[in-house]
Amino acid sequence: MLENKDWTRRTFLKTSASVMALQLVNPFTGFAQNFSPLRENSNMNSNLKSSALPTRRLGSLEVSAMGFGCMSMQHGYAPRLSNEETAKVIRAAYDKGVTFFDTAINYGPFINEESVGLALSPIRDKVVIATKFGYGYDENGKNIGLNSHPEYIRKMTEGSLKRLKTDYIDLYYQHRVDPTVPIEDVVGVMQDLIKEGKVLHYGLSEAGEATIRRAHAVHPVTAVQNEYSFWTRDPEHEVLPACQELGIGFVPWSPLGSGYLTGTITINTPFDDKLDLRAHRARFTVEAQKHNWKLIGLLQQIGQRTYATPGQVALAWLLAKYPSLVPIPGTSNPKHIDENINALKVTLSAEDMDELEKGFATIKVEGPRTTEALFLNHDIGANLGESSKGTHGKSPLPSKGN
């Protein structure tokens, strides 16, 4: 699973300090269950250096095998951190070996890119920054819907470069497929920006197979970023196979299920109604959580054998699915960065993977992954139960004159 030979089992044994014992309480029974995290490096606060982490390839782009999603500190969750607080967490991730950082224009909006720029501009040549375009804003900074028209992409690109304090973007995603602009026109702008040196690689987010193939035919897609985790399987039916066939990297966002797969969220966990997206997600209702906790029990069961937390098993499961897959878990707590990184040391056997798959198929998951309003912005084939085969996806075809 790991590609960097320096990141060996022996290396981790040297950094071990002690074996910690935890108890994970099932909130629906009240019973505590004995639980042992990873033994080879049970010190979850170990400060792993950049040179210690393995790398993976997203197309031709090499990144740390575990990335960092910067969104959750300033968008979608509570509490919201200041730019300075966010920058400190981002630098903590870098200090622990992470070199791949993900942000977007609409996280905040705008302020998350500022935080990333504040944190990473002093070490710009040592990191890979991904950001996204595709949403439009009025003069007051209010999101007014999708906009991937070529001239607007250029405008947004200049703003992102300024906020990120850089003159190039390593990986530039179209955040959502725009149903009013042919994907070929979008890729044409990407080609121009690549020629100008302002963008090095481009990708797509929440795209289906038909759109991915159309984009890739114009200029190679480096990575696709769709939601994917142990409890969200939407990309498996057509998107992930297409990426594997075409040699495109895959970046799963929300790889820990908005924190649920860590086993630390219960029916008593409060969600801010205005700031936390989970307050409005069907999977986080009390009844859904009572059912979905069975998935945590399954992850814990595998964790007992691999000495890993439920979240680490969930991340290790993702890493085992595709060698060109790089998760981007986010957190505002540096201690959680250590735990996520240590998932890279968890090796799941074929038997472990089979047990996880069969268990998931039996348990299933209660509740859709997002709201109906957000589903409408996803491309055809990006959602479970859909297929873009035989269609051109949500993106319109180019006019005959082009």
Image (cartoon, helix red, strand yellow):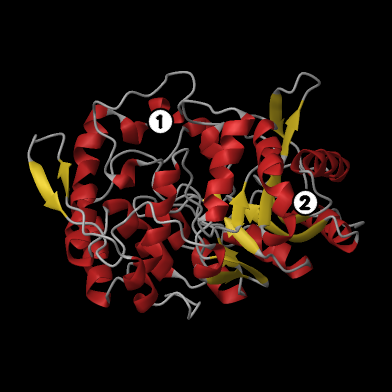
Other residues around mark 1 within 10 Å, as few (<14) / some (14–19) / many (≥20): many
For disc 1, the marked residue is: 278
Q: Are marks 2 and 1 in contact (CB under 8 Å)?
A: no
- Residue 6 at x, y percent in the picture: 48, 78
Which badge, 2 or 1, comes first in the chain's sequence?
2
Q: Nearer the viewer, mark 2 or mark 1?
A: 1
Quarter of the figure with the N terminus:
bottom left
- Residue 352 at x, y percent in the picture: 24, 69
Q: Is residue 206 above or below residue 78?
A: below
Camera-side residue of 391 and 350: 350
Camera-side residue of 12 and 23: 12
Q: Quadrant of residue 28?
A: top left
Label 1 sits on a secondary structure element that is: helix
User: Amino acid type of disc 2?
Assistant: Pro
Looking at the image, which residue is at 35% across and 55% down? Answer: 230
Label 2 sits on a secondary structure element that is: loop
Camera-side residue of 100 and 360: 100
Q: Is residue 200 above or below residue 131?
A: below
Looking at the image, which residue is at 50% across and 77% down? Answer: 4
Looking at the image, which residue is at 45% across and 37% down? Answer: 370
- Residue 323 at x, y percent in the picture: 49, 73
For disc 2, the marked residue is: 182
Judge from the rendering whether residue 179 lies leftward or rightward of residue 271; answer left or right. right
- Residue 7 at x, y percent in the picture: 45, 74
Looking at the image, which residue is at 77% across and 51% down? Answer: 182
Q: CA distance from mark 2 to mark 1?
A: 33 Å
Q: Is residue 302 above or below residue 384?
A: below
Judge from the rendering whether residue 129 lies leftward or rightward of residue 82; answer left or right. right
Q: Is residue 376 visible?
A: no
> Which residue is at the far bottom?
5
User: Amino acid type of disc 1?
Assistant: Arg
